Amino acid sequence: QVQLVESGGGLVQAGGSLRLSCAVSGRTFGTTLMGWFRQAPGKEREFVAAISWTGGATYYADSMKGRFTISRDTAKSTLYLQMNSLKPEDTAVYYCAADLRPTMTRMRHPGEYDDWGQGTQVTVSS
């Protein structure tokens, strides 16, 4: 099992930036895939981005490309999500998640992931 704790959310004006962090502890594997998801009120949980914890390969939802950047620092056991040019529609609770033995074709599905953080609120004002 992997323990995940997000931080870095908050209130920001449209056009601003935030960097989310996710502290990772517990047992990871060479195959572990780490992901960021978000969920707005009344909406389903939505894939944002994912990264291979060991190899660093990155994957993005099409709508996030160019504005969001996922990264990780394995020495610090921390996952990051840099969010730029934020829009009011980016307002949501953001979650990090771990998939210990991923099926890559399912990486965009929340049900694929084994462990989740508690989430951090991001609010973008217009």
Image (tube, grey):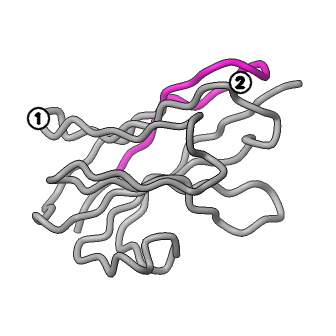
The residue that appears at 29% across and 62% down in the rendered structure is 33
With 1 as the anchor, is 106 left or right in this view?
right
Crowdedness near tag 1: few (<14), some (14–19) or many (≥20) residues, C-alpha within 10 Å:
few
Against 113, residue 12 (above or below) is above
Q: Which label's residue is closer to the chain start, 1 or 2?
A: 2
Say what secondary structure mark 1 lies in: loop
Residue 52, quarter of picture? bottom left
Q: Nearer the viewer, residue 75 or 15?
A: 15
The residue furthest right is: 126
Q: Nearer the viewer, residue 61 or 11?
A: 61
Please provide percent x and percent y for residue 80: 38, 36
Residues at badges 1 and 2 in contact (C-beta under 8 Å)?
no
- Taken as a whole, is the magenta stretch helix, strand or loop? strand
The residue that appears at 33% across and 63% down in the rendered structure is 98
Residue under label 2, please give it: 11
Q: Which residues are magenta?
A: 4-19
